[in-house]
Amino acid sequence: MIEEYDKVVEENNKNLEAAREEGKVIKDEMLADIEEIEAGVEEMETNAEEAENNVLDKFLNVIQTAKQAAENAFEYARLDFEKSVSGGYDSIADMQDAMDKNKKRSERYLADYEKVYELTKLNRDLEKKMDETTNLKAKEKLAAF
């Protein structure tokens, strides 16, 4: 009977050792998976940072372009206005015609400026949405948009 008990104990000890070995293998696999996940997270963070920098660069380029366009439009309007009020008209009607043309140009430039402003505002809203989302695919779609 003691021999049978010893055999059972020995069998249980072998099973316990095998279970420990299997547990160690599973643990090592899980640690490897965790390292892989952490590496993936680091890569995603790097990609997100690069995407953010790219979006900011593009946004700054849009702002700079809009600013330059507005400055050019205002300078053109200013020069045109100076030219039109500098005199040299044959009649009040000619002066009025010139002033009406200048007003139409100014309105067109103002409309262009308002479009640039709206575009800038939309771009700012897009940036805000991108900053608020944590979903990388959504950020990529927003960046592509």
Image: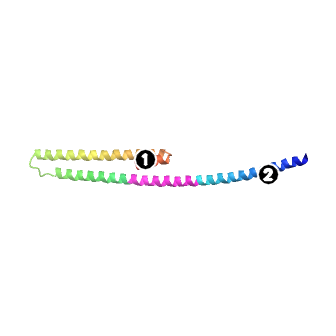
Q: Disc 2 on helix, strand or loop?
A: helix
Is residue 126 highlighted in magenta? no
Residue type marked 2: Lys
Residue drawn at point x = 48 percent, y = 44 percent: 132
Mark 2 crowd level (few <14, some 14–19, many ≥20, 10 Å Cα): few
The magenta span reads 38-60
Q: Position of residue 102 (x, y in %)?
A: 19, 47
Choose mark 1 or mark 2, whichever is in front. 2
Residue type marked 1: Leu
> Which of the labelled discs sits on residue 14, or is there none?
2
> Which of the labelled discs sits on residue 142, or is there none?
1
User: Which of disc 2 and disc 1 is earlier in sequence?
Assistant: 2
Give the main secondary structure, helix, strand or loop, of the magenta stretch.
helix
Label 1 to label 2: alpha-carbon separation: 59 Å
Can residue 92 be seen from the camera position used here? no
Looking at the image, residue 98 sits to the left or right of residue 36; the answer is: left
